[in-house]
Image (tube, rainbow, N blue to C red):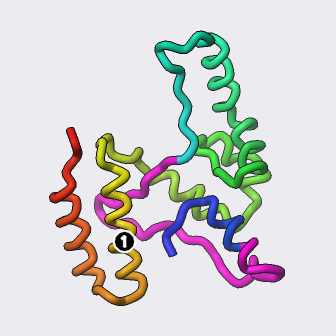
Amino acid sequence: MIEGPTAVGQVEELGGAGFADKYTTAVVPAQKNSTSFVGGCNWSVFKTSKNKQSAWKFSKWFAQPETRVDWYGVTSDLPASNKAWKDEKLASNTKLQAIGDQLKSVRSMPVAFTWGQMSKAADTAYEKMNKGTVSVEDGLIEIQQQADSIGTGM
């Protein structure tokens, strides 16, 4: 399955006792221009905020590598900070090593008002490919047709 880093904890919880030894993680195979999307927690300070200084101070604190590692302990949301990945809590976890390596080949999601629609259409096609009800080639053609139909909304 291709899934985000929070799936590590979810898979082990759903798998039950002893399941951690029955699976592994891997980097998405790279081709000439392939990559993965990076996403997760996003912060912003709104222009109309009445507490801009406090919000900015919080954002700076929350972005610190040690805070990101602590946040992983609470939420299983892995940090996008390469410095945080040097922390022993992450560096020593063999299930997370491939996810850390994947950070070397990531991009932000496209800026498009219709990204949610496109993502849903792609997920539907991926499910068909995973279940074998359509070939990978036909599934990818379907995704491209959906993307062309939906457009960027801009």
* Residue 35 among magenta residues: yes
Q: Nearer the viewer, residue 14 or 102?
A: 14
- Residue 37 rendering spot, x and y as whole percentages: 43, 53
Q: Is residue 28 above or below residue 138?
A: above
- Per the picture, the main secondary structure of the magenta-coloured stretch is loop
Q: Nearer the viewer, residue 22 or 129?
A: 129
The span shown in magenta is: 12-39
x 54%, y 37%: residue? 42
Q: Residues within 10 Å of mark 1 (few under 14, many from 20)?
A: some
Disc 1 is placed on an element classified as: helix
- Residue 125 rendering spot, x and y as whole percentages: 33, 73
Q: Is residue 27 above or below residue 17?
A: above
Q: Nearer the viewer, residue 91 or 2?
A: 2
Q: How many marks?
A: 1
x 37%, y 62%: residue? 120
Tell me the kind of residue under disc 1: Thr
For this orientation, the residue located farthest to the bottom is 132
- Residue 55 rendering spot, x and y as whole percentages: 63, 19
Q: Nearer the viewer, residue 138 or 64?
A: 138
Q: Which residue is mark 1?
A: 124
x 51%, y 76%: residue? 1
Q: Is residue 41 left or right of residue 126?
A: right
Q: Is residue 31 left or right of residue 83?
A: left
Q: Quadrant of the C terminus?
A: top left
* Residue 131 among magenta residues: no
x 33%, y 89%: residue? 133
